[in-house]
């Protein structure tokens, strides 16, 4: 497939690995378009590593069939994290190597996930935009500091740490953006 035909959301093979195209930017430095280039932001499947790639319009990439199945988190065992397909109850086991940083957002009963598959084999996980997590450790609120919006560190029950507003305390449930990893409000 030519670089000029690649669209956002497609999965392609480059340098022996599978990548998902997140952004495509066309650049034509001359009026005739003879030197048109395509800058792409690719994310590794699995792993989520970012690769910025610039190709000419006639460069080739092989498209890979990447499918997504809606799934809910069931449980963790010795092999990894088990997600159950919401439609046909197929179980997909994803190891920590496939999940990477997503492990810190997985909680009991997590819904709204999508397991990414290539040839019916799980290769990645797409989390919901935000998840609710419980604060297990943070500094107490400073009295009289309500006028300032000073963030403080908080450790959540899954082990990740984020910055939260001063008024958040232990056992509060907060929403965390799975895209940015930042505090997104109270749950």
Image: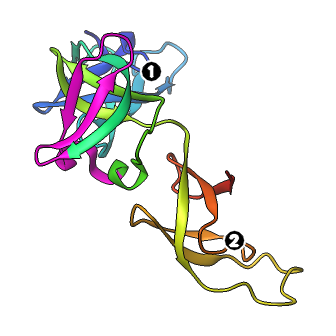
The residue that appears at 51% across and 46% down in the rendered structure is: 179
In the rendered view, tell whether residue 84 sits above or below residue 180.
above
Quadrant occupied by the N terminus: top left
Residue 153: x and y in percent read 56, 77
- Mark 1 neighbour density, 10 Å: few (under 14) some (14–19) many (20 or more): some
- The label on residue 168 is 2
Left or right: residue 30 compared with residue 2? right
The residue that appears at 29% across and 16% down in the rendered structure is: 89
Q: Which marked residue is nearer to the observer: mark 2 or mark 1?
A: 2
Which badge, 2 or 1, comes first in the chain's sequence?
A: 1
Magenta run includes residue 62: no
Q: Which residue is mark 1?
A: 8
Q: Residue 169: tell me if it is visible.
A: yes
Q: Nearer the viewer, residue 35 or 152?
A: 152
In the rendered view, tell whether residue 49 sits above or below residue 157.
above
In the rendered view, tell whether residue 6 sits above or below residue 75.
above
The magenta segment = 77-101
The residue that appears at 61% across and 85% down in the rendered structure is: 139
Please identify the quarter of the rendering in which residue 118 is found.
Answer: top left
Please identify the quarter of the rendering in which residue 81 is found.
Answer: top left
The residue that appears at 31% across and 10% down in the rendered structure is: 88
Residue 60: x and y in percent read 22, 16
């Amino acid at each position: 497939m030519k670089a000029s035909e690649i669209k956002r959301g497609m999965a392609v093979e480059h340098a022996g690995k599978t990548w998902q195209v997140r952004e495509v930017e066309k650049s034509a430095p001359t009026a005739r378009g003879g030197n048109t280039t395509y800058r792409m932001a690719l994310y590794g499947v699995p792993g989520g590593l970012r690769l910025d790639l610039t190709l000419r319009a006639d460069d080739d990439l092989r498209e890979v069939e990447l499918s997504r199945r809606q799934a809910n988190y069931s449980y963790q065992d010795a092999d990894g994290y088990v997600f159950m397909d919401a439609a046909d109850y197929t179980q997909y086991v994803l190891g920590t190597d496939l999940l990477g940083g997503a492990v810190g957002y997985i909680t009991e009963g997590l819904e709204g996930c999508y397991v990414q598959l290539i040839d019916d084999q799980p290769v990645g996980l797409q989390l919901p935009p935000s998840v609710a997590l419980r604060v297990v450790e943070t500094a107490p609120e400073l009295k009289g500091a309500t006028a300032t919006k000073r963030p403080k560190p908080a450790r959540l029950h899954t082990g990740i740490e984020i910055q939260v507003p001063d008024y958040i305390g232990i056992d509060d449930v907060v929403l965390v953006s799975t895209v940015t990893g930042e505090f997104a409000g109270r749950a």
